[in-house]
Amino acid sequence: MTNFPPRRRRRAQLRRRVAFAALVALLGAGSPALADVAGVRGRAPAPVPEAGAPAPVRNDARGAAAQPGAPGAPRPRTFDTGPARAALGRLLPRHATQFTLVPEPATGADTFTVSGRAGAITVRGSTGATLLTGVGWYLQHVAGADIGWPGDSIGMLPARLPAVPAPVTRSALVPHRYALNDTDDGYSGAYRTFEQRRRQIDLLALHGINEVFVQVGAEYPYYRALQGFGYSAAELREWIPGPGHQSWWLLQNLSGFGGPVSERLMRERAELGGRIAEQLRGLGMTPVLPGCFGTVPPGFAARNPGASTVAQGDWAGFDRPDWLDPSSPVFGKLAAAYYAEQRAVFGDSTMYRMSPLHEGGTAGTVDVKAAAGAVQSALHAAHPGAMWAVLGWQDSPKAELLAGVDTSKLLVLDGLSDRYNRLDRETRWGGVPYAMGTIYNFGGHTTIGANTSVWIDRFGSWRAKSGSALKGIAYLPEATGTNPAAFDLFTDLAWEPGPIDQRKWFADFAGRRYGRPDKEAAAAWEELRTGPYSTSSGLWSESQDSLFTARPALTAVGAAYWSPQSMRYPADSVRRALDHLLKVDPKLRGSSAYRFDLVDTARQALANHSRVLLPKIKAAYEAKDLVRFRELTAQWRDGERQLDVVTGSDPNFLLGNWLSAARSWGADEAEQDRYEYDARSILSVWGRRSTSEGGFLHDYANREWAGLIGELYAPRWAAYFETLEESLVRRAAPREIDWHAFEDDWARRTTRHPSGANGPKGDPYTLATSIAAALKSSAGAAR
């Protein structure tokens, strides 16, 4: 793998680690003098120790007590702009030298100032990340370019960047700008490289985020710590799930599935997580690390006298891990061991992420108030004054939990801010600080849209109300990298001094998205604004998914069981947007932003058409009209074929990238196959039969990707239509199909698909034009 040291260098690192561990054992772990002798102070994360060796204690000058913003920590007079300059070089390789970055640590809110003449832009900022936010503001408001997630128009920038008409200063309206759902690693790709994750950090900084959840490698501290509590390494490797499913293990929902994991994999993932955390620190951002709240393997109480555990029951067909009562004396020891192991690899932080009793956890006889206090006490024993971030979801956090903690050190990440109406977060949580969040994407669905007007209205009104506890924004889609307009707009909330005009924002977005204003681009985004980006709250925060990706049934109303079951906006708005995008000035069609948007809009227009076509197929079948049935199912197959081909023309829609990433982490073919199953299963069956069927999680992570459509979704519908046609011909009931077996068979394949730089095939413009013509023809025939 290109993102890890070559094998020979890793052996040398191992020799140094063993020598260091021996020194720790000889002189005594935790000695400040030892830390200085070992050269640990102020360095990158400590080397990942081998299992069985003592974990080196990190005594880092950038630890919790020294991080800017930590309680009692003095504000630095300056900071190193090197990491921000490096990020700027990655983001704007042709123009980075035209920016001068000046550190100006703030005494209050994060602030940037942008000024300068043509070709010489000066950005002053309170942190490295805020300097990049200033660059992002300049690109958006002065240069008229977009670096989106995904797609950019920087190729349209002039060789000499334009001057800033007058200096502009912006300060963050809220102190917390948090990013990444607990599920992001699972649904965005648990097998991504350091370079891919560093790109994500660069984009988050460019858009004003300052707190980022770091999940990759979180299993390693558990793996090492629990070996001191009666568990063998082999037992723990069976208990820890594959990387694609670890998000839900950290949420205390499941264990074991997709494994066993190898010790080598865990070490390398921990090393990657440490690099990510250090990358964030270098930019002055907070790495939000998973905290310890009592997740333990089966049999913990029997192996640890004095421990009290509560079985957590079932989650969607999985047996949940047990919960160690945090009030029991053993919990303090486990938490201390966990945080020590975590510090050795990830360093310290000022914010930790925990959600006890998530989605139906069982308290049993545990006093939740006392347990919450014990969890926070253990956190503060390891990291004095650290913030506890808890997800606001369903009925969590419960009043009992809030009553047991110092809520000035707690932040609720509200996952329901834009989903329901009549929300009063101050009353609900008793004035506890919270961040207004959005989950506009579930499972990594490729559907576009968001409740953007709800964001704009609620952020301003909630913040302005008397006694407001709103202290941040929380960017929480279950998967990132699918919806650049939503990402841009939501993060703008925290930096725009006045209310955002939704119509003007989308018009301006259309101009910078492709490098300069264009009337057809503006018309396209106006259609998208009034359609999928103006959905309302009340029940949903996400748009509907596609029926092409649904498990076959004439009565199908959605692919994922937990998604909207009907259109949330007029379908014609997307088809009209596609027509306008195809008329954009040819000079603007070369950017990755235009190509992505064109493919994505064509894909969405086709997906919406599936909801028009399936009821017609149902009517033909029920009328026993074999000729019409064959005609309509042929149209359906052609739609799937077009969908597979058009998504195959853009690198962001390739199944091959997802699968090849998983295989790249395996040391041999058996391990590669195991991780590929981990990656395939989460897209299809999700888990075992009980999970897929009883828990209704099959197709939860459906997405319209080239390869996934052609190899799973299209054959699945073809098999179904074949049974219906047979039933019409034979005048008998259609034969049953075991869909779980069908889908699990696909998940266990190891077929290869196009990936990498040579993966995309075909011209997006030609393919989108063909789709637009087909949709027009179909609409004309319907009239």
Image (cartoon, rainbow, N blue to C red):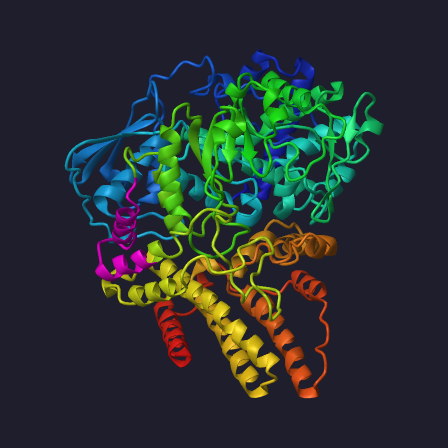
Q: How many marks?
A: 0
Residue 621: which quarter of the image? bottom right
Asked if residue 521 is among those painted magenta in the image, a careful observer would answer yes
Is 781 positioned to the left or the right of 527 in the image? right
Is 3 positioned to the left or the right of 717 in the image? left
Residue 83: which quarter of the image? top left
Is 340 positioned to the left or the right of 568 in the image? right
Tell me: residue 694, above or below residue 427: below
Task: Give whichever of 431, 772 is nearer the camera.
Answer: 431
Residue at position x 64%, y 42% in the image: 248
List x then y, in percent, for residue 572: 38, 66
List x then y, in percent, for residue 31: 61, 13
Residue at position x 70%, y 55% in the image: 670
Task: Give whichever of 14, 723 is nearer the camera.
Answer: 723
> Which residue of the protein is positioned furthest toward the front in this rendering?
422
Residue at position x 31%, y 64% in the image: 581
Is 500 positioned to the left or the right of 291 in the image? left
List x then y, in percent, for residue 408: 50, 19
List x then y, in percent, for residue 561: 60, 56
Tell me: residue 311, above or below residue 488: above
Q: Main secondary structure of the magenta part?
A: helix
Tell me: residue 21, above or below residue 483: above
Regarding residue 50, the answer to whether it shows in the image is no
Regarding residue 214, the answer to whether it shows in the image is yes
Q: Quadrant of the C terminus?
A: bottom left
Please report the bounds of the magenta region as a residue range: 500-527
